[in-house]
Image (cartoon, rainbow, N blue to C red):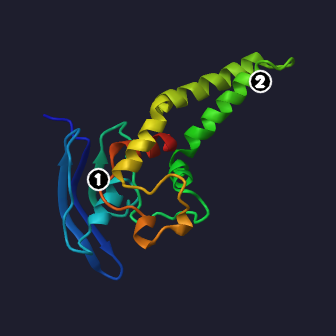
Amino acid sequence: MAQYVFTMNRVGKVVPPKRQILKDISLSFFPGAKIGLLGLNGAGKSTVLKIMAGLDREIEGEATPMPGIKIGYLAQEPQLDPGHSVREAVEEGVGEILSAKTRLDEVYAAYAEPDADFDKLAAEQEKLEKLLATADVASLEAQLEIAADALRLPPWDARIEKLSGGREAPRGPVPPAALEARHAAAR
């Protein structure tokens, strides 16, 4: 029997007062499968995605990801800082990785200090290097460029506050590179 990356079994969702959004939904996804959710406004597409991401646990039935899988979720209406550039807004999703990279550079420099605690520095270096290796920091710039291109983002230096309505929050399918950057930041 095939191993599914995610399974929903007889999932239901009711919101107050007694509005049923989902009823007896059963889905299973193979690794690498491309899926689409189609339906009218209010049909529950976003609810299904929130359940799959683990953001909505108040459901009937079972929603079970494959053990060890990382699931990312890109909000339909992200809250963006109007004072940021497009690049800064995108980098917020990988902030932990960028901070770790900066901190690792500081650790390397700290080895040159006359009173450096080599054991402490080595332990921190190991932790940071593992985080960065898991996040594939070597290809992070390429991942960000691919995500920006796939989402048809404005130029990196464009200010969020200057973008017109529809350009503020890109819509459409989210490429794996964009979600992977967020996954890595969440680890």
Question: Depth check: 133 or 120 in front?
Answer: 133
| Residue type, mark 2 in image | Ala
Q: Position of residue 9 (x, y in %)?
A: 21, 54
| Residue type, mark 1 in image | Ala
> Which residue lies at the image location 55% right of the left edge and 54% below the top edge?
157
Q: Secondary structure at mark 1?
A: strand
> Which residue lies at the image location 19% right of the left edge and 69% below the top edge?
39
Q: Is residue 59 above or below residue 42?
A: above
Q: Residues within 10 Å of mark 1 (few under 14, many from 20)?
A: many
Q: Position of residue 156 (x, y in %)?
A: 51, 52
Tally of marks: 2
Res 82 quadrant in image: bottom right
> Which residue lies at the image location 35% right of the left edge and 59% below the top edge?
50
Q: Position of residue 36 (x, y in %)?
A: 20, 56
Res 31 quadrant in image: top left
Question: Depth check: 39 or 142 in front?
Answer: 142
Left or right for 137, reference 166: right
Q: Secondary structure at mark 2?
A: helix
Q: Position of residue 136 (x, y in %)?
A: 46, 30
Question: Depth check: 72 or 78 in front?
Answer: 78
Which of the numbered marks, if any, corresponds to residue 63? 1
The residue under label 2 is 110
Q: Earlier in the sequence, mark 2 or mark 1?
A: 1
Q: How much space separates mark 2 and mark 1, taking CA atoms? A: 47 Å
Residue 179 in view in this figure: no
Disc 2 and disc 1 in contact, CB within 8 angstroms: no
Res 4 quadrant in image: top left
Could you tell me which quadrant the N terminus lies in?
A: top left
> Which residue lies at the image location 25% right of the left edge and 75% below the top edge?
41
